[in-house]
């Protein structure tokens, strides 16, 4: 992030321009904060059995997050590395740390560019609202739809209700047939 980066409060809209960054205001989970205040109390990582979802590090009270999945584990693979003037075979399990950051936490704000990547780090579903039955009724009242309203209200899960809210909130957006 630079001083020219425009911060946009995340409301469920995932589209931003290159000079923009999304954020949510939140407190980090206790187990993440504990890494900064009591690293000795953390469980030792065993990459052969632990399921790693995120790598993070802390510099000057800023938390940097990177997504992680099993493809970045080097276990039982034929890997060579160059050291000094010689190639060596990697004999121990290792992991790949990429030269990128998927999210940053600073001063009570969790910043990200990609909802999909950030949601793998910390669930963001609580940061946009579900459509109420009344909102679903307004949505379904559009002439473009022919549907069973009672069925839609009864069967809309959290994600569908959140998507309906997003459609309804779009400024200047209306459903129509061209």
Image (spheres, rainbow, N blue to C red):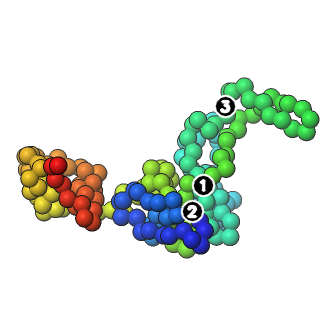
Q: Position of residue 96 (x, y in %)?
A: 67, 41
Quarter residue 126 falls in: bottom left
Residue neighbourhood size for the residue with mark 2, other residues' Cα within 10 Å, grouped as few (<14), some (14–19), many (≥20): many
Could you give the CA–CA distance between mark 2 and mark 1, rounded to whole angstroms? 7 Å
Judge left or right: residue 150 versus residue 31. Answer: left
Q: Position of residue 65 (x, y in %)?
A: 58, 56
Residue on which disc 2 sits: 104
- How far apart marks 1 and 3 lie (CA) works out to 24 Å
Q: Name the residue nearer the viewer: 51 or 107.
A: 107
Image coords of residue 64 (percent x, y): 61, 60
Nearer to the camera, 55 or 43: 55
Based on the displayed image, in which of its 4 quarters is residue 68 positioned? top right
Closest to the camera, between mark 1 and mark 3, is 1
User: Front-most of 73 and 7?
Assistant: 7
SS class, disc 1: loop
Q: Is residue 67 visible?
A: yes
In terms of sequence position, does the residue under pointer 1 or pointer 3 come before the other? 3
Give the secondary structure at mark 3.
Answer: loop
**Residue underneath mark 3:** 75
Task: Report whether 172 appears left or right of 84.
Answer: left
Write down the residue under mark 1: 101
Q: Is residue 49 above or below residue 99?
A: above
Using a 10 Å C-alpha cutoff, classify the residue at mark 1 as few (fewer than 14 neighbours), some (14 to 19) or many (20 or more).
some
Q: Residue at x 90, y 32 (%)?
A: 86
Q: Position of residue 171 (x, y in %)?
A: 27, 66
Q: Are marks 2 and 1 in contact (CB under 8 Å)?
A: yes
**Residue at the (36%, 64%) spot, across then down:** 11
* Residue visible at 12% across and 50% down in the picture: 144
């Amino acid at each position: 992030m630079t001083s020219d980066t425009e911060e946009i409060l995340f409301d469920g809209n995932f589209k931003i321009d290159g000079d923009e960054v999304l954020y949510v205001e939140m407190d980090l989970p206790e187990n993440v904060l504990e890494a900064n205040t009591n690293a000795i109390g953390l469980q030792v990582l065993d990459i052969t059995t632990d399921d790693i979802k995120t790598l993070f590090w802390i510099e000057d009270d800023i938390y940097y997050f990177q997504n992680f999945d099993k493809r970045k584990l080097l276990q039982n693979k034929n890997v060579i590395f160059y050291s000094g003037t010689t190639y060596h075979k990697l004999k121990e399990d290792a992991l790949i740390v990429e030269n990128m950051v998927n999210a940053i936490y600073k001063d009570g704000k969790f910043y990200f560019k990609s909802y999909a990547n950030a949601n793998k780090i910390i669930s963001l579903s609580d940061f946009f609202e579900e459509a109420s039955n009344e909102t679903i009724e307004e949505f379904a009242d559009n002439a473009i739809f022919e549907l069973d309203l009672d069925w839609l209200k009864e069967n809309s899960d959290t994600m569908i209700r959140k998507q309906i809210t997003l459609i309804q909130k779009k400024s200047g957006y209306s459903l129509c047939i061209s």
